[in-house]
Image: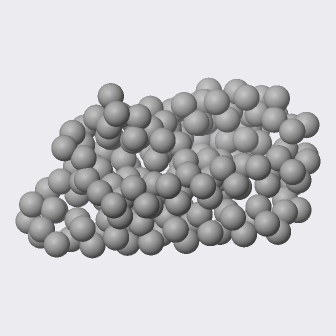
């Protein structure tokens, strides 16, 4: 159960910051347009990438023993850098939610845009295949870690999509973004330190 929770926390924290994919899900949620479909596609895409990362690193670490520790160190370095980016954003402040932007009406356009936001997004591969995959090698039960990471992804996207309508007044205030960035930064640094001291 601890391994599942660890996977959940890592996955949830990595996708917590608003990027291209999350912004699209958020916009669809705010406009209440094809929300279930968008959340499902985003979650399933992440689940596939997490599966690839967890299963690949297990095989690769057996064939090339030094590769997994190298990726774990690289993952820790990335987490420190990612945490610093969020800390800097918190310190700088000034971010506000802009929910408008691209208007997508048809199901076809919505699906294609949603798929592109995941499968053409380098950060999606970095977060799921590389980072989640490398961190999973530190746990004896990698399947449980992958399940936790997948649950984290599903939880985040559906909460974001359906909870978006309640976030509009909140994230129109810069202080809310500062708090969010601070939480993400702290979580990333804690995970990085855990990786190093394991």
In the image, residue 183 sits, relative to residue 83, either above or below, namely: above
Which one is in front, 126 or 187?
A: 187
Q: Quadrant of residue 116?
A: bottom right
Q: Farthest residue in the front direction?
A: 197
Q: Residue at x 44, y 32 (%)?
A: 151
- Left/right of residue 104 with respect to residue 141 in the rendered view: right
Q: Is residue 98 visible?
A: no
- Quadrant showing the N terminus: top left
The colour style of the image is one colour
Q: Position of residue 125 (x, y in %)?
A: 43, 60
- Left/right of residue 173 with respect to residue 123 in the rendered view: right
- Quadrant showing the C terminus: bottom left
Q: Residue at x 91, y 37 (%)?
A: 169
Q: Quadrant of residue 109?
A: top right
Q: Position of residue 6 (x, y in %)?
A: 40, 41
- Left/right of residue 194 with respect to residue 18 in the rendered view: left
Q: Position of residue 96 (x, y in %)?
A: 87, 54
Which one is in front, 148 or 33?
A: 148
In the image, residue 173 sits, relative to residue 60, either above or below, namely: above
Q: Farthest residue in the left direction?
A: 63
In the image, residue 124 sits, relative to residue 151, either above or below, namely: below
Q: Residue at x 24, y 54 (%)?
A: 137
- Left/right of residue 109 with respect to residue 101 in the rendered view: left
Q: Position of residue 123 (x, y in %)?
A: 52, 62
Q: Is residue 42 visible?
A: yes
Tell me how many marks there are.
Answer: 0
Q: Residue at x 24, y 43 (%)?
A: 142
């Amino acid at each position: 159960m601890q391994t599942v929770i660890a996977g959940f926390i890592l996955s949830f924290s990595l996708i917590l910051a608003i990027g291209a994919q999350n912004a699209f899900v958020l916009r669809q949620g705010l406009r209440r347009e094809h929300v279930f479909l968008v959340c499902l596609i985003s979650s399933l895409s992440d689940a596939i990438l997490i599966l690839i990362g967890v299963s690949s690193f297990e095989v690769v670490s057996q064939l090339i023993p030094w590769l997994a520790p190298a990726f774990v160190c690289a993952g820790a370095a990335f987490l420190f850098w990612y945490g610093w980016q969020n800390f800097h954003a918190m310190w700088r402040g000034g971010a506000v939610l802009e929910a408008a932007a691209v208007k997508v009406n048809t199901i076809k356009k919505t699906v294609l845009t949603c798929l592109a936001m995941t499968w053409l997004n380098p950060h999606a591969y970095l977060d799921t295949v590389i980072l989640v995959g490398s961190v999973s090698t530190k746990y004896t039960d990698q399947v449980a870690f992958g399940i936790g990471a997948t649950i984290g992804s599903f939880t985040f996207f559906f909460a974001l999509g359906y909870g978006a309508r309640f976030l509009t007044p909140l994230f129109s205030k810069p202080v809310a973004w500062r708090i969010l960035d601070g939480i993400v930064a702290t979580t990333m640094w804690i995970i990085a330190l855990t990786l190093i001291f394991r």
